[in-house]
Amino acid sequence: MNFALIRNPFGRLVFTGADGEVHESVVPVRAFPIGAPDDGIALVSGEGRELVWIDRLDTLPAATAALIREELESREFVPLVRRIRGVSSFACPSTWDVDTDRGDAQLVLKGEEDIRRLGRDKLLIADAHGIQYLIRDLTALDRGSRKILDRFL
């Protein structure tokens, strides 16, 4: 690792490069936020210049990787759907009651085209308010949730 990363007293990330140059308000940016969240991350300066490219987070020291993950989680809001409790209608628009990793939620599905497949077992659902919900593994959902989804896919 040819850089150091710390959080300053104001909660911002501070990057020190191998040349000793210091950059405040550094932002991590994922190249593939859904498909490969731990692969391909750039640390970008406050001016928008890429400072370093990280192929894989797990190659960094644990403390540095944890800082980057914390920053990404605070900036990205993609709740993971754990269960679909019910839907108001099988015709769109419909309101879905779901359990997520961030608590209970209701999302409004405008049309079936708002459900996108990302590979064989991943789905990204865009609700009417622009929030993206992720189903990371269809096979991990309970039978009732899969049955509801089958009606929309």
Image: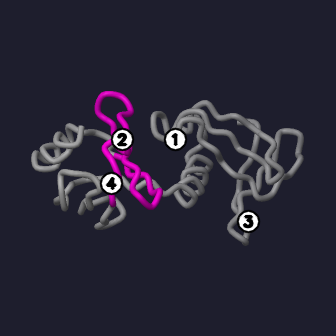
- Where is residue 98 shown, x and y percent of the image? 25, 60
Q: Secondary structure under badge 4?
A: strand
Between the residue at mark 3 and the residue at mark 2, the CA separation in whole angstroms equals 43 Å
Q: Does residue 102 appear anywhere in the picture?
A: yes
Mark 2 lies on residue: 113
| Mark 1 and mark 3 residues within 8 Å of each other at the beta carbon | no
Estimate the x, y position of residue 83 in percent, counting from the top left.
21, 54
Q: Amino acid at mark 4?
A: Leu
Label 4 and label 3: CA atoms lie apart by: 41 Å
* Mark 3 and mark 2 residues within 8 Å of each other at the beta carbon: no
Q: CA distance from mark 1 to mark 2?
A: 21 Å
| Residue 109 lies in the magenta-colored region | yes
Instruction: Give the magenta-colored segment's residue range.
Output: 108-134
Q: Residues within 10 Å of mark 4 (few under 14, many from 20)?
A: many
Tag 4 residue: 109
Q: Secondary structure at mark 1?
A: loop
Name the residue at 88% across, 45% down: 20
Number of other residues with Cα within 10 Å of mark 2, as a class: few under 14, some 14 to 19, many 20 or more: few
